[in-house]
Image (tube, rainbow, N blue to C red):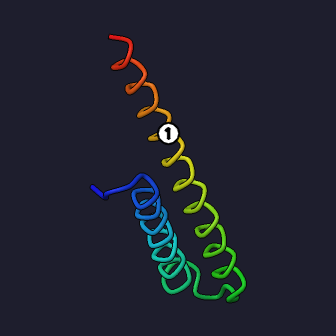
Amino acid sequence: MARTYKSEGRRLAHLVRAAFAAIAVLLFMYAFPTWDREYMAIVLAIGWIAGELAGAWWIRRRRAYAKRTQSRNRTV
């Protein structure tokens, strides 16, 4: 994995964004070719937001877990 929690979160955000971009392109080209480009932009924007939220969630979760395990190790 990455060296810091932030870089792990960034990796996750990029992965989620790439997945949503692929979904948007597939929907736009194959499933609904008559859709306007606004729909593709909306799906891409949702992917961007979902990626940022997933990355932030990952960072908070990892830091909280590290803090819990660190405090347990200190008391023992």
Which residue: 44% across, 41% down?
62
User: Would residue 3 be found to the left or right of residue 19 on screen?
Assistant: left
| Mark 1 crowdedness (10 Å alpha carbons): few <14, some 14-19, many ≥20 | few
The x and y percentages for residue 63 are: 47, 40
Above or below, 4 against 44 in this view is above
- Judging depth in this view, the residue of 72 and 48 nearest the camera is 72
Residue beneath label 1, please? 61
Above or below, 43 against 34 in this view is above
Which residue: 55% across, 62% down?
51
Task: Indicate the secondary structure of the residue bearing disc 1.
Answer: helix
Quadrant containing the N terminus in the rendered view: bottom left
- Judging depth in this view, the residue of 49 and 10 nearest the camera is 10
Which residue: 43% across, 22% down?
71
- Judging depth in this view, the residue of 70 and 22 nearest the camera is 70
Snapshot quadrant of residue 7: bottom left
User: Would residue 18 be found to the left or right of residue 28 on screen?
Assistant: left
